[in-house]
Amino acid sequence: MDDQEDKVIEPSEIIVETEEEQGKTNYKKINPWQRFLARFTDYSLLNLFIIFLRYLFSGHFSLLHFEYIIPLQFLLWVPIEAFFLSKCGYTPGKFLLRTRVKFHLSKKLDFSRALRRSFSVWVKGMGLGIPIISIFVMLFSYFKLKTEGTTSWDKDEHTHVVHESLPKGQIIISFAIIFLSVFLTCLFSR
C-alpha cells in the first residue's frame, strides 16, 4: 500500500452533528399550547371546508343530525389526519405551527399507526368532541403531558411530537383561521 493506509475510527472519535447544532432547526421538547393550536387550526380548516360544501349544496350538506351532540367533523378528521401524518409527518395546522409527529424521532408514521394515534386522540384527547367531556379530557391530557412529557396516544404508538420555534405571524394566522371558522359557523347556523 502506498502512503494511504486504512484508518480505523474508534467509536469515541465519531461526532454526530445534529440539525440543532448546525443552527438549522431549534426544537422545543414539550409545548402543549402549540399542539393545541395546531389541532384546532386543523379542525377549523376542516370546518371551513364543510361550511363551503354546505354553501355549495344550498345548506343541505349535513354529516348527521347528531353533529351538535357529538361533532362528527372531529371523527371525520381522524383518517384525514392519519393520511397527512403518514405522508408528510404533519397536518396543515401542524405545518403552519411547525409541529411534526415522528415515529422513533426520525421516521414518518405508517398509515395504520397514524390512524390508531389519530383515533386515540379523538377518544382520549378530545373526548369524542362532546362539549363538557372534552374539557375534562383535554385538561387531563394537558397535565399528563406537562408532568410525564408525553400523552397516552404518543406513548401507545411510540411517537414523538417535535416543535420548531414559532414566529408570531404564524400564531396570528392560526388564530385568524380559527376565528373565521367560528364566525362562519355562527353566521350560517342561523
Image (tube, grey):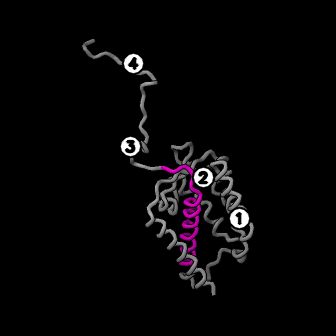
Q: Amino acid at mark 3?
A: Gln
46 inside magenta stretch: yes
- Which one is in front in this view, the residue at disc 4 or the one at disc 3? 3
Quarter of the figure with residue 9: top left
The residue lying at 57 percent from left, 75 percent from top is 50
Quick one: 157 or 169, which is closer to the camera? 169
Q: Are marks 1 and 3 in contact (CB under 8 Å)?
A: no
Q: Are marks 4 and 3 in contact (CB under 8 Å)?
A: no
- Which one is in front in this view, the residue at disc 3 or the one at disc 2? 3
SS under mark 3 = helix
Mark 1–mark 4 Cα distance, whole angstroms, equals: 57 Å
Mark 1–mark 3 Cα distance, whole angstroms, equals: 42 Å
Mark 1, residue position: 128
- Tell me: residue 52, above or below residue 190: above
Q: Magenta segment, principal secondary structure? A: helix
The residue lying at 62 percent from left, 61 percent from top is 78
- Which one is in front in this view, the residue at disc 1 or the one at disc 4? 4
Mark 4–mark 2 Cα distance, whole angstroms, equals: 42 Å
Q: Is disc 1 surrounded by few (<14), some (14 to 19) or many (20+) residues within 10 Å? A: many
* Residue 71 placement (x, y as % from top left): 68, 71
